[in-house]
Image (cartoon, rainbow, N blue to C red):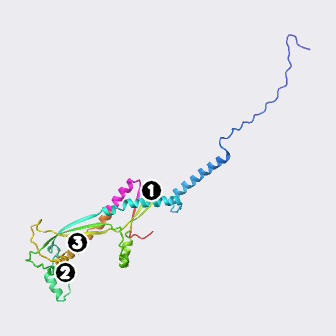
C-alpha cells in the first residue's frame, strides 16, 4: 500500500567500495643505467677511501696512474730546486798576516824547530810552531822576535753543495767514491698528505781562494817570493784556515740556509710538511 503524496523511485543497489591500488610511476632511467651509476659511485668511494687511508696506515697502493703522477711531480720539483744548490752558498772571509797570525800561543818557533832537528820529542803545540818555522825558512822569511817580514793574505772560503759526480770516480778510493755517490739530491712527494721529503747531499767547501794583498792597496812592505815559496805559504795558510772554518760551523750554516730556503719555496707551492734527511742518515 503506497503512502499518498510521496512518489518513490526505484534505486539500484550500491556496490561496495574497494581500495584502489596506487599507480606506478614510470622510471625515468632504465634499470641497467641505474645499476651502472650505482657501481661507479661505489667504485669512486672505495678508491677515495683507499687512497686516503693506505698512506696513513703505511701501506702501499700501487696504481699505475698515481705512480706516474707522483714521479712526474718529483722530477719537476727536483729540476726546480737543483739550481738553488749552486746559487745558495755561505762565504767566510779572513784577513791574516803571515806568519805572525799563525804562531801558536806561548811558543817559540825557532826553539821548537831546533829541538825537532835534534830529535827531541815535542808537544802538539811545539810541533805546530816547528812546522811554521820550517815553512818560513822555505819561503825565505826570517821568523824571530825582531823580524818585520810578513805577508797580508785574504782568504775567501765558500760552503755549498756539489751535485755533480766526478767522471774519474772509478780511479779513486772506495771512501771517496761513496761520498760522491751520496751527494745526489732525492725528492719524494706524497700529494695526499701534502708532504715533501728531501734527501740532501752533504755540504762541503766548494771554493777556497787566497789572495796576496799588494802594496798598491795596502802600504805594507813587499816580500819577494817565487812560485815555489808562494805555494808553500798558501798551502800552509789554506790548511789552517780550512780547519778554522770547519770548527766555526761553515757546513752547518750552509745546510741550515739551504733548508730554510727550501721550506719557503715548498710551502709557497702548497706543500704543508717538509721533511729533510741527509746522505749520512741510515735508510729506514
Q: Is residue 92 magenta?
A: no
Pick whichever of labels 1 and 3 is earlier in the sequence. 1
Disc 1 and disc 3: Cα gap in Å?
A: 43 Å
Can residue 51 be seen here? Answer: yes
Pick whichever of labels 2 and 3 is earlier in the sequence. 2
Secondary structure of the residue carrying tag 2 is helix
In the image, which disc is placed on residue 241? 3
Mark 2 touching mark 1, by CB under 8 A?
Answer: no
Quarter of the picture containing the N terminus is: top right
In the image, which disc is placed on residue 76? none
Position in image of residue 187 (x %, y %) = 42, 63
Quarter of the picture containing the C terminus is: bottom left
Mark 1 touching mark 3, by CB under 8 A?
Answer: no
The image quarter in which residue 244 lies: bottom left
Position in image of residue 170 (x %, y %) = 38, 77
Q: Residue furthest top?
A: 5
Residue drawn at (46%, 61%), measured in percent from left and top?
Answer: 71
Pick whichever of labels 2 and 1 is earlier in the sequence. 2
Q: Is residue 267 magenta?
A: yes
The image quarter in which residue 204 lies: bottom left
Task: Mark 3: give few (<14), some (14-19) or many (20+) Cα within 10 Å.
Answer: some
Q: The magenta stretch spans which residues?
A: 257-273
Q: Which residue is mark 1?
A: 194
Disc 2 and disc 1: Cα gap in Å?
A: 56 Å
Position in image of residue 202 (x %, y %) = 35, 69
* Numbered disc total: 3
Relative to 220, say whether 172 is above or below.
Answer: below
Q: Which residue is mark 2?
A: 131
Q: Residue furthest left?
A: 146
Secondary structure of the residue carrying tag 1 is loop
Amino acid at each position: 500500500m503506497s503512502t499518498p503524496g510521496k512518489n518513490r523511485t526505484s534505486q539500484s543497489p550500491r556496490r561496495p567500495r574497494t581500495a584502489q591500488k596506487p599507480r606506478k610511476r614510470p622510471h625515468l632511467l632504465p634499470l641497467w643505467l641505474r645499476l651502472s651509476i650505482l657501481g661507479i659511485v661505489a667504485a669512486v668511494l672505495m678508491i677515495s677511501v683507499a687512497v686516503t687511508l693506505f698512506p696513513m696506515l703505511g701501506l702501499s697502493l700501487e696504481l699505475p696512474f698515481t705512480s706516474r703522477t707522483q714521479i712526474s711531480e718529483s722530477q719537476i720539483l727536483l729540476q726546480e730546486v737543483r739550481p738553488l744548490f749552486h746559487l745558495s752558498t755561505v762565504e767566510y772571509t779572513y784577513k791574516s798576516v803571515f806568519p805572525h797570525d799563525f804562531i801558536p800561543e806561548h811558543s817559540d818557533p825557532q826553539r821548537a824547530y831546533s829541538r825537532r832537528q835534534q830529535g827531541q820529542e815535542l808537544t802538539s803545540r811545539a810541533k805546530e810552531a816547528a812546522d811554521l818555522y820550517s815553512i818560513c825558512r822555505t819561503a825565505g822569511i826570517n821568523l824571530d822576535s825582531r823580524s818585520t817580514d810578513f805577508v797580508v793574505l785574504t782568504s775567501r772560503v765558500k760552503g755549498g753543495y756539489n751535485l755533480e759526480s766526478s767522471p774519474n770516480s772509478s780511479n779513486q778510493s772506495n771512501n771517496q767514491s761513496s761520498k760522491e755517490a751520496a751527494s745526489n739530491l732525492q725528492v719524494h712527494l706524497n700529494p695526499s698528505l701534502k708532504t715533501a721529503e728531501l734527501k740532501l747531499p752533504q755540504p762541503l767547501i766548494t771554493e777556497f781562494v787566497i789572495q796576496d794583498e799588494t802594496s798598491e792597496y795596502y802600504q805594507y812592505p813587499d816580500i819577494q817570493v817565487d812560485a815555489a815559496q808562494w805555494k808553500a805559504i798558501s798551502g800552509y795558510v789554506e790548511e789552517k784556515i780550512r780547519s778554522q772554518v770547519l770548527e766555526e760551523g761553515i757546513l752547518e750554516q750552509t745546510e741550515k740556509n739551504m733548508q730554510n730556503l727550501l721550506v719557503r719555496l715548498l710551502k709557497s707551492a702548497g706543500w704543508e710538511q717538509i721533511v729533510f734527511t741527509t746522505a749520512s742518515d741510515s735508510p729506514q
